[in-house]
Structures are given as C-alpha cells and as structure tokens.
Amino acid sequence: MTVLLLFSLAIIVAAIVPGPDFAMVVRNTVLSGRASGMWTAIGIGLGVSVWVVAASIGMAALLAASALAFTIVKVVGAAYLVYLGVKSIRAAVKDRKRPVDELDLGREMSRWAAFRSGLLCNVLNPKAAVFFTALMPQFIGSGSQWTLVSELAVVAMITCTVWFLLLANLIGLMRKILDRPRVRAWLNGVTGAVMVALGLRVAAT
C-alpha cells in the first residue's frame, strides 16, 4: 500500500506540471465541451498505463536507448502537437471574423476522437519514455513482478484520469464565459500557440 501511494504521488506531481496532456484537455474542453475533455482525460490515463507496462518490460528503456526510435517517436509526436495547435489557431482566426450569430459554439468532437487525441498525445510523448524508464525501477526492482506492475498501471491510469477529469470539469464550469466569441477565440489561439510551442520544443530536445 505504501508503494502504491508513493507511486500515485509521483504520477500526480508529474501530471500537474503543465505539458502536452494538460494543453490537450484544455483545448478539447474549450473546443467541444466538458464531455470531450473528459474522454480526452480517459485517453491520457490509458496512455500512462501503457507507459507503465512498457517501462516494466523494457520497451521504454529500449526506446530511450535507441536514437533512431526515439527520434521517430519525437518527430511524430511533435508533428501531431503542431498540427493540432495550428488547427486551434485557425479556428480562433475564423471565429474572430464571423458574426456572433454564425458561430458554432457547440462544435462536438466524437467520444472516440477525444479519447484518441488524449491517448496519442500521451503515447507519442518521447519524454514519457524517459520519465517512466527512470521511475519504474524505483518501484519494481530488476525483475518484472506482474501483479505489482498491473497494480501500478491501474493506479497510474486512475490517478492521471481523475486529475484530468477534474481539470476538464473545472473548465466546463466556466463554459458560459468561455463561449463568449472573443474569449473563445482568444483561448483557442493561446491554446493552439502553446501546443505549437510544445511540439517545437519536443522536436528540438
């Protein structure tokens, strides 16, 4: 129980630090509402559990050690973030130019699209490979204890998902303010710029 609590604390500290996952939840919630943000959170949670298992069986360590594999994941992840960022910026520009009565404030993203965006954002983050490669040996030792690995994967998924669900709901509560055309356009623009910057940073490091 102590191991699980310490692991949960490590995961929540890492999740709270703003990064691609944080930006993705904000983007999808602002763009398509609370439900989209929540499905994005679930996708991120699953992605974290994937990294826990991958690190435990050595895949993440292999990825971190292989320059070519690491570069491929880094480029793909960076391109994905930049693509979504540019998409948000374009939406912000269009919203600013449209009359208020023509704005589609109810743009809905499908559950699958929201879930997939969260999952891909996390799984394609090369820094996650480095983080979990360093973190997991502190909890599982040199041997793969599959019962413990499974428990850690579930704890990581629940911890991350709960945090990002709270974030999505907090932003959702502010929806009346966020749905104002100028505010919405500004937030889409800022979130898009942040995602582009994060993508370029991933590519450069």
Image (cartoon, rainbow, N blue to C red):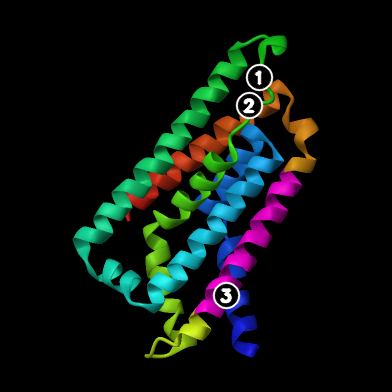
From this viewpoint, which residue is outermost toward the left? 68
Distance in Å between CA atoms under marks 1 and 2: 6 Å
- In the rendered image, which quarter is residue 142 located in? bottom left
Q: Is residue 136 above or below residue 65?
A: below
Q: Residues within 10 Å of mark 2 (few under 14, many from 20)?
A: few
Residue at figure coordinates x 49%, y 80% from the top left: 149
The answer, for residue 204, to whether it is visible in the render is no
Q: Is residue 102 left or right of residue 147?
A: right
Residue at figure coordinates x 27%, y 60% from the top left: 70
Looking at the image, is mark 1 or mark 3 earlier in the sequence?
Answer: 3
Looking at the image, do the residues carrying marks 1 and 2 touch, with CB atoms under 8 Å apart?
A: yes
Numbered range of the magenta stretch: 150-171
Majority SS type along the magenta span: helix
Distance in Å between CA atoms under marks 2 and 3: 35 Å
Would you name the residue on which mark 3 appears?
Answer: 10
Q: Secondary structure at mark 3?
A: helix
- In the rendered image, which quarter is residue 178 located in? top right
Q: Is residue 166 left or right of residue 55?
A: right
Q: Amino acid at mark 3?
A: Ala
Q: Is residue 3 magenta?
A: no
Would you name the residue on which mark 2 appears?
Answer: 107
